[in-house]
Image (spheres, grey):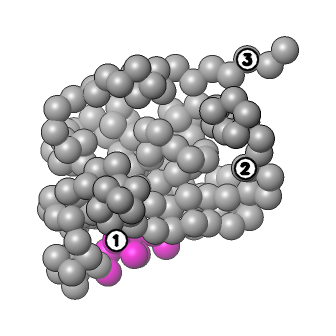
Amino acid sequence: MEHLYTPWRSDYIHGKTPQEGCFFCLHQKSKNDEENLVLFRGDTSFVLLNLYPYTDGHLLIAPYRHIAQPNDLSKEEWIEIHELARRGIAALEKVSHPEGFNLGMNLGRVAGAGVVGHLHLHVVPRWNGDTNFMPILAQTKMINENLHTVYKKLKSAF
């Protein structure tokens, strides 16, 4: 029998929030990048691993400013977010060799935004067969590698 062990998800599953407020704002101010899974800090935006990933290596790229809409981004923020996406894709290709990517922003709660007020870009690496029967039959998403292992690999690639 296989056992799935994802201890970092237990607080999420049980409805506990590790901190009050916007985690993007809290993480950008913190100096503990490894604990907060912050991979890279740019001039206007930063990259971190998603604590609740769709797949291994799921990146989030957010501006430092707490803004909700793309039209509120400065030209510099818009360019840097997309440059960081390019760098993230290159790092993921070097480290984990995905066969494709999903990139996107969920703008507003009805669009699936988990953090409604702080715009962010998802970079989701994809592999053939990474979506299987587990979410449908067992309401379980399988993540293959520990977040901190993925963090260390990607940190060196950035």
Q: Residues within 10 Å of mark 2 (few under 14, many from 20)?
A: some
Residue 83 sits inside the magenta stretch:
yes
Residue on which the image places disc 3 = 3
SS of the residue under disc 2: loop
Q: Are marks 3 and 1 in contact (CB under 8 Å)?
A: no
Residue on which the image places disc 2 = 131
* Visible residue check, residue 153: no
- Which is more N-terminal, label 1 or label 3? 3
Q: Residue at x 63, y 33 (%)?
A: 139
Magenta residue span: 79-87
Residue 144 sits inside the magenta stretch:
no
- Which is more N-terminal, label 1 or label 2? 1
Task: Please state which of residues 47 and 111 is positioned toward the viewer in this rendering.
Answer: 111
Task: Please state which of residues 137 and 19 is positioned toward the viewer in this rendering.
Answer: 137
> What's the distance in space between the residues labelled 2 and 1, CA to CA?
27 Å
Q: Disc number at residue 81? A: 1
